[in-house]
Image (spheres, rainbow, N blue to C red):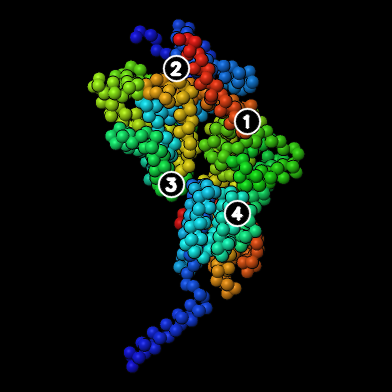
Amino acid sequence: MKRSCKIAIALALILGSTQATQAAPKKSYRVGAAVYGLKAEFMQIWVGALKEHPAVKSGLVKLTVFDGNYDALTQNNQFDTMVTQKYDGAIFVPIDIQAGAEAVNKAFAAGIPVVGSNTRVNSDNLLSYIGSNDVIAGEMEAEAVIKGIGGKGNVVILEGPIGQSAQIERRKGNEQALAKNPNVKVVEMKTANWSRAEALSLMENWLTAHPGQINGIIGQNDEMALGAIAAVKAKGIDLKTMPTAGIDGVTDAILAVKRNEMVSILQDARAQAQGALDILLRKLVGPSYKPSSPIWAQYAKGMPWNDGQDKVYNVPWTPITLQNADALLKDRQK
Amino acid sequence: MSDPTPAPPAAAALVAAPPRIQVTRLLSRYGIIVVFLVLCVALTLANEFFLTWGNWANVLRQTSINGILAIGMTFVILCGGIDLSVGSLLAISGMVAGSLVTGIHAHNPVIAILAGVLTGTVLGSINGLLVARLSVPPFVATLGMLSVGRGLTFIYSDGMPIPNLSMGFRYIGQGDLLRIPMPVVMLLAVFGICYFVLTYTTYGRYVYAVGGSEKSAKTSGISTRLITFSVYMISGALAGLAGQILAARTTSALPQAGISYELDAIAAVVIGGTSLQQGGVGSLVGTLFGALIIGVINNGLDLMGVSSYYQQVIKGIIIVAAVLLDAFTRKRQQ
């Protein structure tokens, strides 16, 4: 009796599992995430968040991360690899908006859907794109500094590497905010190549060239803003008299926000990474797929799921404040 | 032998008039000083803030890191080699020290600094072993270390910067000793010691001898292997020290610190008249002024608000012109 019972259960299990395989033709999907490079904190957080996605943890997705090493050709080659190894789908963070298009087209021709994330790529063959609008961030940070200096005075702008899309768009945002405030003058504007050490030297020199005349600092990313802060501190200037802003929300910047030294705007790497995988899975699994990342609930208002069918998803920016700083830091500790 | 010791170059630059007795001798040996003075006069006329103590503190502070790297590089190039790994060694050394001076169990900064310098020394010794013992061409051995060192930095830090270095540690980057910034004190100390070693000790003569002709050095009974090994160790140790200053200056250990710093260090050495083609020709005084010229160009162009596009062009032209003028002066003196 017991034995037949066991057989029945085993049979039921086998039948059940075959039925399940029929409903979803594959048990797991091979997904490649091609990112432009893993040398900066932001992409580290992005990749870390992708690996934390419920679908990756449950084994539904077998994830491979490709480090593009900041080179368009390397990324292109990695797409060749994904095509020959018949990956089911790809998430793409390209280094170059134009050169990346070729890679997307190759994957498209091979029937591999590609979702863009974080940085744009100029291709119609992209299934969807999820990122944050840098123009808005540039405008938000400039407005924060302008407000901090009371709507009039002199500011300096630390720019990203000239020609990179984030630099171009953040500058556009900076300029939009400045255009609305004719009493704010830009006394200096120069690239520090996203680098803290370069921004430190540049700011030291500016403080000498314009003694007592600089009222606020707009850094197009946090690293540069932090470099400028180090220069201001070393000069013995009270940071409260020198409103400073950055973008991205790297850990060091959150700590600086807590010390009341700067304003930073969080670019949500987790939403960009996990959101991209959900959009991709919606395509791979089919209409039955429900997004499993908590980010869709978090941004239900600013970025509705819309069944994963939108061409562009704009992850809202979150200003870092004393209220949310601790929670963000706790999130990073994992 | 009974010559008075040369005036400290930084002081000479400030007074803008080298001691009388040595003027002609110095000029014949170091046409580069003329170039440096011409640049300083031009920048003084162009910008009212250039010749202020505050600005010179900036210039010297900004030159200190490249200056220390270039001093180590001079040993290597004098010996007929090259060290491409200094930027990477700088990063990993800063990272090792940074990890020791943060958190609840923060160590004494002196221990951390020693550990950082030791890291650079050990990795530099590996360069030395490869070149001296296993006859790997210096370019190849140190190119390998450039990559390995950077990779180790990312592995060690998981790609994240280490913020919040202890105040004691920051002192070597941000503090002053008798109104002189600490990085400058370190640069002058390193220069003084290395100048003495290269000029007045048997070891220093051996370095020149090995670089001039390894064969004749060997026949004269010099352990050429040991000398070759030692110069890479020195370069590694100084890269380690430079890493401490950079981390202290930016108040955090950054995994992407020092990328392509080897190029500026080599440029300083070459501007200073040390020959890349043939070993055994060159001097540390030249190197120091080479580093100062690069520092002064960067600072001056920042002060005058020259756009970064032009800045690169101007910097390149001045570097080549400096070497040309130096070669020209030497010829005439001969």
Identify the chain of the residue marked 3, using the numbered disc in the image.
Answer: B
Residue that carries the numbered disc 2 in the rendered image: B8
Amino acid carrying label 1: it is Tyr
Amino acid carrying label 4: it is Ala
Seen from the viewer's position, the closer of residues A191 and B142 is B142
Label 4 crowd (10 A; few <14 / some 14-19 / many >=20): some
How far, Cα to Cα, is label 2 from label 3?
39 Å
Q: Earlier in the sequence, mark 2 or mark 3?
A: 2
Residue that carries the numbered disc 4 in the rendered image: A101
Residue that carries the numbered disc 3 in the rendered image: B154
Q: Secondary structure at mark 4?
A: helix
- Determine whether label 2 and label 3 are within 8 Å by CB: no
Q: Residue furthest bottom?
A: A1
Q: Residue furthest top?
A: B21
Task: Place residue B118 in its image quadrant.
Answer: top left
Q: Is residue B23 left or right of residue B305?
A: left
